Image (cartoon, rainbow, N blue to C red):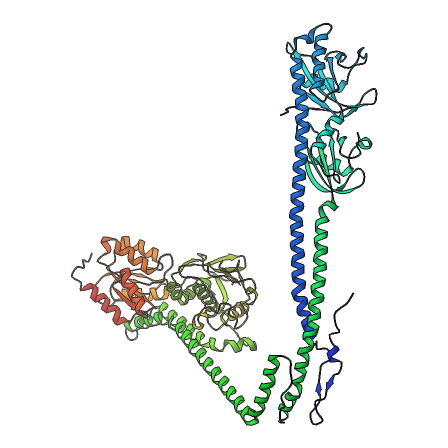
Amino acid sequence: MVTCTTINQFTSNPTPNPNRALQRPVVQTSSSQPPVHVHPRLPTIRFRLALLVLSCVLPAAIVSAFLIYDHYRVERASLLGEAMATARSMVSVVDRDFETIVTALRTLATSDDIGDADLAEFRRQAADLHAILPITEVILYDAATRRQLMNTVRDPLPAEPGDEKLLHDVTLRTQPAVTGMTRGVGGNATITVAIPVVRDGVVRYVLAAQVLPAALGGILTEQKIPNSWRAAILDGDLRIVARNVDIDRHLGTRPAAEVVQRMHRQPEDTFDGTTVDGRSVVVLYSRSARSGWSVTLGVPHQDLTAGLLRTLESLIIATVVILALGLGMAWLVGGRIAHSVQALISPANALGMGQPVKPAIVDFREAQQVADSLVRAAAALDEARGRADKELLERRAAQEALQEADLRKDEFLATLAHELRNPMAPLVNALEIMRLGGPGAAPPPNVLDIIERQLKQMVRLVDDLLDVSRITTGKLGIRDDRIVLQDVVTHSLETAGPLIAQRRHALAVHVPDEPTALRGDATRLAQVFSNLLNNAAKYTPNGGRIALHAVRLHDKVRIEISDNGIGIAADVLPHVFDIFFQADRSLGRTQAGLGIGLSLARRLVELHGGTLTATSPGKGLGSTFALELPVATDEVSAPPADDEGGVPLPALRVLVADDNIDHANTLRTLLIAAGQTVNVCYDGLSALRSAETFEPHIAFLDIGMPRMDGYELARRLRAEPRHRGCMLVAVTGWGQDKDQQRSLAAGFDRHVVKPLQPAQLRGLLQERAGRATMHLA
């Protein structure tokens, strides 16, 4: 059965012995000198020079080989690309030839003589096509009976019908078609191109032309394909129709099985394979989407690698020659150097024994300089001077060590002093509240709690000086108290807040609304949280983002402290909890700490039955420290409400904004005791909203608050005409000249450094009350 394809649209070892110069393990310089023992495995100078030659030549040879191979790959890809372009071009030529025949047949089919009874004139017209097309015969079939009505070659007409499948496909699809290669009655191989002839909307005839495969062989000849290559044209059945070599043997056969399989999968491909005659080649093929015919090319591997092998052979020869010359020079020069070095042995031994040093005879300048130095050293060296120099160096090293220790001590004390100042502000306010209550008056419950809590915090900060030794000896312990997570977070924010404010970070705090009970040491856990918050503030560029997020997970609570700071490198991350480990040396020591914070924090968390881990996507991508702590089973009662007192002072509306809750609450108690109307907020945005309705006469504002810092809050208040009469007081832990200048620039009237003394508070209230422009509601 013949398959036809419907055409829908035409368009050896020269290296010296390295130990030859070391055959004698002992060199005797004189009868009065001790023997010099030489290690038998030490390499000689000649061996070292030989390695130097090899280290210079071999890398260059390897790089050259790589470049040559890379050039080969580029050239190979270019050659195969050109070969694929040739295959595509030949496929296009095959399609074009078939299209030419179809066009001629369509022109012939328009003849009015096709319906004559004897078809003599039509036969003459069809015979004219032999002169202009590579065809052997033109045949006219009756579409209904499948029998020949006319041909241009032989009479009488054959009685048997034509190719049933071809005629059926052309009649049914009304499209031109090309068969694969077939053999006629005489055994001649032919290719048939057929078109339908339509009359009155019905296919009446089928007009066909037969082409010899040899006509397609000219396409291969025109491409001037190299003799070593193998090229073939395949019909729609993937049978060889034309081949540049040995066509008689392979006409009508199929290519290698792998080629056939790949052609069924995809229209084009390049791969290593074999030809039908068994040659190892790189196979390229391109198959037409219009006719289904294909062109295959086989490029021998020898043609691709011949240039590479020749170049590599030249490179190997050149490398061997250069190595031979280099090793020979290394042998000669190494011998001269070895002789000069060995000549220095006797003067050196004499110098060590205090004997006169004789000048050595050497062969190069550097050895002569050494020989001269030995002579000069013998005259200048003595034991007393050596001891004096050694003692001087030791004293100098000890002095430098003491200076370094003193510097570290000063930096540590400065850091510790800064940390101890943070609890002072709420303590001073609490004591003033107790004094205002008078003798025998019971202080408000929260005041005693604040004093106790802040004093314990200060004691624990001092105790941290001993934590390093406690960690190493395993004696670090904690209290087992019933505590509330929200209180611990609040206390840690009191400590870390100033640094966060100084760096102008945006702080986001998310904790459960319901109190979360824990078992442990509140101060120690607050120490852990504040340490992590301080680290986040220190290692995040100014204006960054810090978040504290707590969530209840069944019998545990998970707290994550994250930032968008400098991050932690992957090789540093496993060591961040090592004691005394500091990854970033770019910070000053006072800012960078002593390297015990994270190690102590993890140990404290573990003593609470929890875990502390660190993660970071990498440098510059921030970091996250996650704690998991077990939750206590008992419920937490709400804290008692603050008591209020009164001190007679001019009645004003006072706004207090501070994220240090203890400081804000104690200041509120003092103001209420002084007869003031007070509104307290714990972040800048809440304070701004409160001022819209409260309309304060005076506002005490912290600088480092979450959601909106004090500077921005002051600017917003000053921008509103109704708040221009409000006296703005910055209450902060930062008191340098630049801090005061920045506060005044933001719109503050006064800049007060924590702790705010009672006398200062009364003075500020009286100052505001005495303003002539004040209007009390």
Image quarter where the C terminus lies is: bottom left
Q: Quadrant of residue 263?
A: top right
Residue 71 vs 131, above or below: the answer is below
The spot of residue 96 in percent (x, y) is 66, 26
**Residue drawn where x is 64% and y is 9% of the image:** 200
Question: Which residue is most to the top?
Answer: 117
Q: 456 above or below 104?
A: below
Residue 230 coordinates in the image, percent (x, y): 75, 37
* Total numbered labels placed on residues in the image: 0
The picture places residue 522, in percent across and down from the top left corner, at: 46, 68
- Residue located at (60% from left, 83% from top): 368
Q: Residue furthest right?
A: 186
In this picture, residue 71 sits left or right of residue 634: right
Q: Quadrant of the N terminus?
A: top right
Instruction: Residue lying at the far left in this picture: please name it.
Output: 772
Which x, y percent locates residue 367? 62, 81
Q: Quadrant of residue 210?
A: top right
Judge left or right: residue 393 versus residue 446: right
Q: Is residue 241 above or below residue 157?
A: below
Q: Nearer the viewer, residue 106 or 360?
A: 360
Q: On the rendered structure, is 651 left or right of 227?
A: left
The answer to whether any part of residue 77 appears in the image is: yes
Whether residue 645 can be seen here: no
